[in-house]
Amino acid sequence: MVEENPAQSVINEAKRKQPSLTKHFMGVVTANDLSHSYLFSGVDGLGKLAVAKTIAMRLFCKNVRDGMPCGVCNECIRIAKDEHPDVVMVKPDGRSIKVDSIRYLKREFSKSAVEGNQKVFIIDDADTMTTSAANSLLKFIEEPNGQVNSFLLTDDYRKILPTIISRTQLIEFPKINEDDLIKYVTKKGLSKTSSQLILELTGDLASLDKMLEDGWFNKMKATVERWFNELVEDDYRAFTNVQTNFMPLVTGRFEQQMTLKMIYQIFKDVFDVKFKDSRPDSLGFGDQYTALKKMALKLSDEQLITIITSILGSTRKQDINVSFQNILEVITLNCLAVIEG
């Protein structure tokens, strides 16, 4: 069996995961109407990087076929393997993208293109940029040198500085069809309420399977529910809960991200109960409806917004050298302080 080359693999992934978006962008390039800068937003596994690389291949490919890159020429293969001198990839160095990485990118793009006039840069996990890195990128996006296209990839555009969002074209990647996802999780033995929460947390099967490994999803869901109920009762055991119950389950960045998403989701459910009068079957934590309702009644509008804003802001602390335990403890103390009024 002949092994598929890396370029064809990338193109096939883009077409499989995002057929409509891929077709759209191929047409945009053909029409010479590609925007200067894009922000691709969507959960992991939706093909954001594959689509960005396929667009880059289409820009550089020497043998375009039916509007698609050929996937076999030297240009396509080097782009797929991150070896093309005029297509620069930036990824997190550890847990964040630091200002030095952006300075390197700017230096590279201040030079003339090596093999033509076109240059492309792709920033993966752009939400992990430190504030100084994001600010350094901002001026470059506003005033690029020459024919440059940029693609910033993130799992949630709300983690990106508003000033950057305003200077890019936001493309939200659609999740996997919910009916297909529900069928999949039902086969895995999850309850209806757990299935609803899964839909809120992820849109791809790879992340779903990872969450279900060794019962992690059910364990963390129970931990978040216990923590939340302690907050409802103004119980400071919610603080000790971080070290004793949360931290043994958080072994890497993926688990950190999913944990913060769960914490955000349970307070988003409070918001939906308070302002939309949402019913249990439409909520991620619908089986905690009594506690959600109690919290909704306990908090003023301003208090609830303060808590949700604090939780969203905590995701940026992952970009700097702050321990995850500290992040959760600060969230907990902030919640308790707001609840006590």
Image (tube, rainbow, N blue to C red):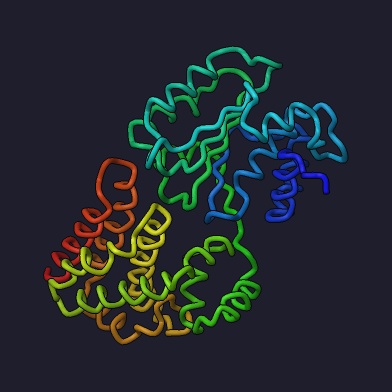
Q: Outermost residue toward the top?
A: 112
Tell me residue 113's x, y (percent).
Answer: 64, 16
Spot the residue most to the bottom.
290
Q: In the rendered image, which quarter is residue 334 located in?
A: bottom left
To which quarter of the image does residue 32 belong? top right
Which residue occupies the extreme right position in the image?
66
Q: Is residue 66 left or right of residue 329?
A: right
Q: Is residue 65 above or below residue 48?
A: above
- Image quarter hosting the C terminus: bottom left
Q: Is residue 334 left or right of residue 288?
A: left
Residue drawn at the location 39% of the way across and 81% of the way down:
277
In this picture, residue 34 sits left or right of residue 340: right
Q: Please provide percent x and percent y for residue 37.
A: 57, 35
Q: Is residue 36 above or below residue 13?
A: above
Q: Is residue 202 left or right of residue 224?
A: right
Question: x and y percent of residue 256 in the render?
Answer: 36, 57
Who is closer to the viewer here, 313 or 318? 318
Residue 245 horizontal/vertical position (percent):
26, 69
**Observer-nearest residue: 158 or 93?**
93
Identify which residue is drawn at 51% across, 36% down: 123
* Quadrant of the rendered image containing residue 58: top right
In this rendering, the answer to whether 219 lies above or below 327 is: below
Residue at the image point whose x is 46% and y is 41% from the top? 126
| Count of numbered tags | 0
What residue lies at 27% left-to-right and 77% top-to-bottom?
226
Residue 204 versus residue 91 in the image, above or below: below
